[in-house]
Image (tube, rainbow, N blue to C red):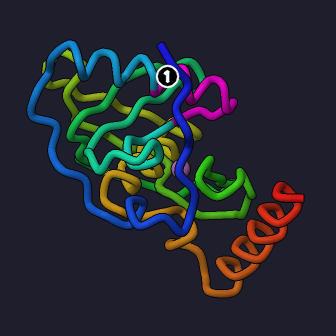
C-alpha cells in the first residue's frame, strides 16, 4: 500500500465528472487500499478518486463507524436538513458552515462490483453527499454563498503561501 498525493483546488481534475468504474479487478482493489491509506494519513473521513488525480466515480469513507467503498455512487434520496461545518482535504481542511440533507440513501457498488444500498444520517450523510459531489466534479465550496466561498478561498491561499515558506 502507498500514500498518494492529494490534489488540491483549483486542479482541473477536481472539476471533472468522473468516468464510471467498469473493471472490478485487482487494480481497483489496490487503488482502494491506497485511497484508504491516504485518507487515514491525512486524518480525513472520506476521499474520492479525483482527489488523488483520477477522474473516476469512486470514493472511500470511514466516518462515525461507517466504513465503505462506493463505486458509481448515486444519491437515491436526501431528506430533511442539518446544519454543520464542512471541510475538504483538497481545500486545506478549512471549515465553513454548510446546510445539507439530514438523511441520505446511497446506492453504489462495492470493490467486487456488488450493488448495495446504505442509509446514513448526520455526519455520515454529509459525507455521502460531499464524496458523491467529488465524483460529479463539485467541491463543497461550490455550494457555499459567494461570500463564504471567497472567505474559504482566501484562507486557503494564505495557508498555501505559509506552507511554501
Ligand atoms: Ni472533499
- Does 53 sit above or below residue 60? below
- In reply to whether residue 45 is colored magenta, the answer given is yes
The magenta segment is 35-46
Q: Residue at x 30, y 59 (%)?
A: 136
Quarter of the figure with residue 14: bottom left
Residue 19, placed above or below residue 108 = below
Q: Is residue 61 left or right of residue 147?
A: left
Residue at 33 percent across and 45 percent down: it is 54
Q: Is residue 47 above or below residue 74?
A: above
Give the camera-side residue of 107 and 77: 107
Q: In the orientation shown, which residue stands out farthest toward the left? A: 22
Q: How many marks?
A: 1
Examine the image and state in which quarter residue 153 appears. Answer: bottom right
Image coords of residue 165 (percent x, y):
90, 59
Viewer-proximal residue among 78 and 48: 48
On the rendered structure, is 163 left or right of 29? right
In the structure shown, which secondary structural element does the residue marked by tag 1 occupy?
helix
Closest to the observer: 68 or 93? 93
User: Camera-side residue: 23 or 95?
Assistant: 23
Provide residue 1's location: percent of width, then percent of height: 47, 13
Q: Determine the image quadrant of residue 83.
A: bottom right
> Who's the residue at 23% across and 20% down the image?
27
Q: Which residue is mark 1?
A: 36
Magenta region includes residue 131: no
Residue at the location (66% across, 25% down)? 41
In the image, is 25 to the left or to the right of 38? left
**Whole-percent x, y for residue 51 in the image:** 47, 47
- Return the x and y of residue 147 as percentages of the image width and height: 70, 86
Question: Mark 1: few, some, or many residues within 10 Å (few <14, many ≥20)?
Answer: many
Q: Is residue 147 above or below residue 54?
A: below
Amino acid at each position: 500500500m502507498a500514500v498518494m498525493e492529494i490534489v488540491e483546488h483549483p486542479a482541473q481534475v477536481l472539476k471533472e465528472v468522473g468516468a464510471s468504474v467498469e473493471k472490478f479487478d485487482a487494480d481497483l482493489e489496490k487503488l482502494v487500499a491506497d485511497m484508504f491509506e491516504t485518507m487515514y494519513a491525512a486524518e480525513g473521513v472520506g476521499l474520492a478518486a479525483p482527489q488523488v488525480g483520477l477522474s473516476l466515480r469512486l470514493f472511500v469513507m470511514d466516518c462515525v463507524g461507517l466504513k465503505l467503498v462506493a463505486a458509481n455512487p448515486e444519491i437515491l434520496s436526501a431528506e430533511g436538513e442539518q446544519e454543520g461545518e464542512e471541510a475538504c482535504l483538497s481545500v486545506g481542511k478549512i471549515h465553513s458552515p454548510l446546510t445539507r440533507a439530514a438523511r441520505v440513501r446511497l446506492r453504489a457498488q462495492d470493490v467486487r462490483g456488488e450493488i448495495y444500498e446504505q442509509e446514513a444520517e448526520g455526519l455520515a450523510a454529509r459525507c455521502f453527499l460531499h464524496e458523491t459531489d467529488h465524483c460529479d466534479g463539485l467541491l463543497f465550496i461550490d455550494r457555499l454563498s459567494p461570500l463564504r466561498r471567497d472567505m474559504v478561498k482566501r484562507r486557503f491561499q494564505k495557508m498555501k503561501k505559509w506552507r511554501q515558506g
